[in-house]
């Protein structure tokens, strides 16, 4: 059974940093690309980053470029999102999702909440 | 960025009736490889999004045959036949032709 379990969220102050993790199981993690997608409270879905299966390419939404870094450790079946210079508008549920070949996120984790507030 | 426009914002349906949701993209989602990069998700209350349909009309694994997708180019439709209470939630279309992936704003389906 495919499982994606996010962790590392919490309440932080504006300007601070946070690192999210997503542990994968039930599939060959090293063969799949991965996304981070977020959803602000009562809002829609916003794609923020993706990484190829072998980390050879990474892409970011303009809203997080230069502040967030996506990475992965295939030996640990884990995806990361390092978030710096956090702003109130980064408050959201953060989901990791996998894809194979085409960029379509086909399975999502349950999400982790990040709240940025003073 | 490709803009995705969904309508209606919300729809209330009597169980057993049908519902249709429209999604329009600002650019054709048909790639030269013949694949149209448009899919649909359902986000049930307090849950993460679940893939319903990929590439316009293909049902994802385990998805009920009451869901169907159609369309081409820039105009797409999700139809839910014989609506059930378990279909309640927000439906999103997404384009994955290019980065950034972009989602429609969502259509909330409620039961009358």
Image (cartoon, coloured by chain):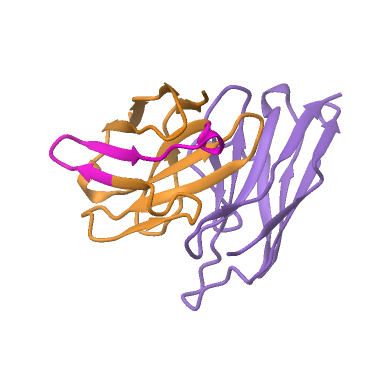
| The image quarter in which residue A52 lies | bottom left
- Residue B98 x, y percent position in the rendering: 49, 65
> Do we see residue A74 in this rendering?
yes
Residue beneath the point at 45% across and 26% down: A13
Q: Residue farthest to the left?
A: A75
| The image quarter in which residue B44 lies | top right
| The image quarter in which residue A75 lies | top left
Residue B2 versus residue B19 in the image, above or below = below
Location of the C terminus of chain B by quadrant is: top right
Tally the numbered discs: 0
Q: In screen coordinates, is A46 left or right of B14?
A: left
- Residue B31 x, y percent position in the rendering: 52, 73
Comparing B5 with A116, the one in front is A116
- Residue B62 x, y percent position in the rendering: 50, 35
Task: Read off the magenta span.
Answer: A71-91
Q: In screen coordinates, is A58 left or right of A95?
A: left
Residue B81 lies in the magenta stretch: no
> Do we see residue B17 in this rendering?
no
Q: Identify the chain drawn in purple.
A: B
Comparing B26 with B31, the one in front is B26
Location of the N terminus of chain B by quadrant is: bottom right
Drawing shade for chain A:
orange
Q: Residue farthest to the bottom?
A: B32
Residue A75 lies in the magenta stretch: yes
- Residue B29 x, y percent position in the rendering: 59, 68
Comparing B43 with B86, the one in front is B43
Residue A59 versus residue A4 in the image, above or below = below
Residue beneath the point at 21% across and 54% down: A54
Residue beneath the point at 79% across and 46% down: B20
Residue beneath the point at 71% across and 27% down: B88
């Amino acid at each position: 059974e495919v499982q994606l379990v996010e962790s590392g969220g919490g309440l932080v102050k504006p300007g601070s940093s946070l690192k999210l993790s997503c542990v994968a199981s039930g599939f060959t993690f090293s063969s799949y690309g991965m996304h981070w997608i977020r959803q602000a409270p009562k809002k829609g879905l916003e794609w923020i980053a993706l990484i190829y299966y072998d980390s050879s390419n990474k892409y970011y939404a303009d809203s997080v470029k230069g502040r967030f870094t996506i990475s992965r450790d295939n030996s640990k079946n884990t995806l990361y999102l390092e978030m710096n210079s956090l702003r109130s508008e980064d408050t959201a549920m953060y989901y990791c999702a996998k894809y194979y070949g085409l960029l379509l996120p086909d399975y999502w984790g349950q999400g982790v909440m990040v709240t940025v507030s003073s | 960025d490709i803009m995705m426009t969904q309508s209606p914002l919300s729809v209330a349906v009597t169980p057993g009736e049908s519902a249709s949701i429209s999604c329009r993209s600002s650019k054709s989602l048909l790639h030269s490889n013949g694949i149209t990069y448009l899919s649909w998700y359902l986000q049930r209350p307090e849950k993460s999004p679940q893939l319903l349909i990929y590439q316009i009309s293909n049902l994802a694994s385990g998805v009920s045959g009451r869901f169907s997708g159609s369309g081409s180019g820039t105009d797409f439709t999700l139809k839910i036949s014989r609506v059930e209470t378990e279909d309640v939630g927000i439906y999103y279309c997404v384009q994955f032709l290019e980065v950034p992936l972009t989602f429609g704003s969502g259509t909330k389906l409620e039961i009358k």
